[in-house]
Amino acid sequence: MPSHAKPSLEAGLVALKQGNYQTAIAQLEPIASSQSNGTASLQAQVGLVMAYARIGEASKAIAISQNLIQSNNPQVQEWATRALEHLTKRKKRDQESKNVETGFVAFDNSTPDSTPVTPPETPTLEEQPKDQVIETKSNYTPPMVPLARLKATVATPLPAAGSVPLSGFMGSVTRTQAKLFGVIYWRQAQRARAWQPLRKPKLIPLRLLTAGTFIALFWVIREMLKLAMGLINQTLVKLPYLEPLQLLYSNPTKLLLTVLVILIALSPWLLDLLLAKLYSQREFSKDVLNAHSREAVRVLQRCCQQRHWPLPKLRILPMAAPIILTYGSLPRNARIVVSQGLLEQLADDEIAIIYATQLGHIAHWDFAVMSLLLLVTLPIYKLYQQVSQWGDKISGIWRSPVTILASIVYGVWCLLTGTALWLSRLRLYYSDRVASEITGNPNALIRALLKIAIGIAADIQKEEETSWQLESLNLLTPVSQQQSLSLGTIASNLSFESFLKWDTANPYRRWFTINNSHPLMGDRIERLCQIARHWHLDTELHFASEPSKVKRQSFLLQIAPWLGIPLGILFAGLVWLTWQLAFALKFLNLKWIYEDWSFITGCLLIGFSIGTVMRINSFFPDIKPATVQTDDYLPNLLADPSALPIDSISVRLVGKLLGRQGTSNSLGQDLILQSSAGLVKLHHISWLGQPVNHQDLIGRQIIVTGWFRRGATPWIDIQTLETQSGKTIHSPHPIWSTFLAVAAQAWGAYVFLTG
C-alpha cells in the first residue's frame, strides 16, 4: 500500500477528533492489533472504544474494553473497567427506554438498528482521586483544535506501558489525548453527604421584580395597542367613504388587564397546545425519566411530598440542543419540559439537579409570569417565522415590504421579551440555590451548566444556525444561546476558569449584562462554589481571588453616550435656573420656552450626541495590518479579565460564517463566525447599494476583519467580510455611529430652540 495510506496513530486520532469515526477505525484497528508498540496499541484501543461508542457499535466497544481489562498496566485495567461499566449501563438504559412508549423518535445519528451508547462519563487514564476526563453524551460535537497543535501533541512520545510509575503514563494520556478524543477535563468534585441548610434568602427583591415584570409587560402591550388603534383610526379618517371606529377610541386598560389575568390562569393548557403544535412537544413518563436519571425521579417525588405538591407533569421536546423549562400558573398545574438532548448529554446527578432548579422556579412563583410572557411571545415569534418564510418564497417589488414587516414583527418580539430580562437573570440565582440545597450537589450543577453550554454550541455548529426553538424559548432556559457560543467551544483551547475569569474579576462586568437574558456564567458558578465551600467540599472550578485592574477612565469612556444623558439633565437644570434668574431681573424673557418642558428632551439628545462623538475614535480605531490579531491569539483575548469593549482589539479571523439564511436574518441578528478557536458572535450593519449581501456568504469560508470586544458576550464588530474569491462586504459601524450622533445633535438642537 502507498506510504500515505499506511495506518497511522496520528491520523486515526485526528480523524477521531474531527468526528470521522469510520476513518479513525480504519486507521486505529491495525495499530490496536499490533504487538510491536505497546503504548501505541493501548492508545489505539482506547480510541477505538470511543469511535465505536460514537457510531453505536456497543458490542465492539465493550469487547475492546474487556480486552483492555487484561492489560498488564493497572491504570489501563482501571480505565477499561470503568468504561465497561458505563458502556454496559448505558446500553441497558437505552434498551429499557426503547420498551417504553414515548410518542416520538429520539435524535441520534445512528442507523435504526444501532443506538449510540457513548457513556455519560468516560473514566480517565489518570490515577487522581478527584480529577476525571468526562465525555459528554452522543450528541456532543468535539471542539475543533488546530491541526498543527494536534500533530505536536500526537508526536510527543509516551513512555512504554508498565515502564514508569502510574502518574507518568496516565498524565501524558489525560492532558493531551483528552482533547484529541473530543472529551473535556472535569474535576468531578464530590457532593455533600450531609449538609446544613443554607441561610434563607431574601425573597422580597424577587417578588417585587416578578410583579414589576408583569406591570412592564402590561404597560408595553397597552401602549402598543393604543398606538395600533390610533393608527387604524387615523387611516380610516383619511380614506374616503369610511368612518373611524369609536371602539378604537376607548381606553383598553381594563380589558387588557382582565385578558392577561385570564391568560395566566389558562397558561398551562394553552402552552401545552402551542408547544405541541409548534415544536412537537409530547408527554414524558416518569419511567422513561427514571431510565435516564433515577435520582431525578427521587428528587421530584421527595420535594413534592415535602411541599404537598402533586408531581409536575413531565413533557419532552425532540430537540438535540440541551434545554429545560417550566411553565404553569400554580404548583399543582406546573409542567417541566426537557429536551432529548439534555437527557442524552448530562449524567444522572446532573439531570437531577437541573430538574431541581425547575422546582426552585415553582417554589418562588416566578414561573407564572414567565409562562405569561412565553404565551404572549410565542405566537408573535411564530408570525415572524411565517412572514420570513413568505419573504423567502416571493421576489420582485413585494420582497422588500415583506422583509420590513418581518423585521418589525421581530422588533415587537424583542421589545416584549425585553420586559423580563431583569427577572430572567435574577431568578436563576435563586433557583440555583434551591437546587443545591435540595441535592447537596452544587458541583453537579456547575458541570451541568457547562455541558448545556457545550451542547447548545454543538447544536448551533451542527445546524449552522441558531434554531427557531432555541431563540424563541431562550428566556426560560438555564443557559442562553448567546453565552453558549464562545463558552461552549473554547474548552479545547482555554480552561473554563480562564475564560470565566472576566465574569468574576472585572469590576464593571455587571454593567454589560443590562441587555442579557441570563446572568454571567462565571458569577453564577462562583456562587455555587461558595455554597460548596460552605459545606467543606472541593469545587469543580477554582477561580483566582484577586480582582482585575481596569482603568476608570476607560470605563467612563465606554459609557460616555449614556453619561451624556444625566449630564444633559444637569445642563437643562442650569439653563432653567439661568432663564428664571434672567426673567426675575427683567433682563431676558424666555418664559415661552422654559415653561414648555420639552426643552429637557433636547438637552438629553445633545448630551447623548456629545458622548457618542467622544467615544467614536476609541471605539473604532484604524485597523493596521501590523497590529491585527489572528485566530491563534483569540483565546488570549477571551482570557483577559481586565478587557472592556472600548479596548477595540483589531482582529482578522478566518472561519465559516454561520447563521439563518433569508428574510429571517435580514437584520444580521444571527451571524456567527466558526473559527478554529471556537464560535464568536458577529455584529453587522447592512449598507444599501452593496453588490453582495451578508446572507450570500452564510455557509462559506470567510475572512472577518473588525474590532473584537470582550463583554458579557464576546463579539466582533465587523469592518469587512471577505471571501476567498475576493468578494467583500463592508459594515459601516463608524459611519453609522457618526450619523447617529449628528442626528441626535440636530434633533436635540431643534427641540431646544423651538420648544
Image: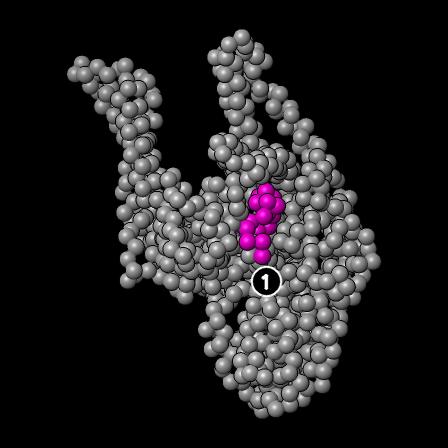
In the drawing, does residue 526 fall left or right of residue 92?
left
Depth check, front residue: 260 or 9? 9
Residue at x 51% of width, y 49% of height: 659
Question: To which quarter of the image does residue 96 belong?
Answer: bottom right
Q: Which residue is mark 1?
A: 141
The colour scheme is: one colour
The answer to whether 511 appears left or right of 310 in the picture is: left
Q: Which residues are magenta?
A: 462-480
Query: Tag 1, which secondary structure?
Result: loop
Where the N terminus falls, by quadrant? Answer: bottom right
Q: How many marks?
A: 1
Report whether residue 704 is seen: no
Q: Is residue 575 above or below residue 478?
A: above
Depth check: 167 or 331 in front?
167
Q: Residue at x 47, y 73 (%)?
A: 149
x and y percent of residue 235 in the render? 50, 16
Q: Is residue 60 visible?
A: yes
Residue 139: give x, y in percent of width and height. 64, 60
Residue visible at 51% across and 85% down in the picture: 157
Relative to 326, does residue 246 appear above or below in the rendering? above
Q: Quadrant of the C terminus?
A: top left
- In the image, residue 522 lies at what x, y percent? 50, 56
- Establish if 565 lies above or below 290: above
Q: Amino acid at mark 1?
A: Thr
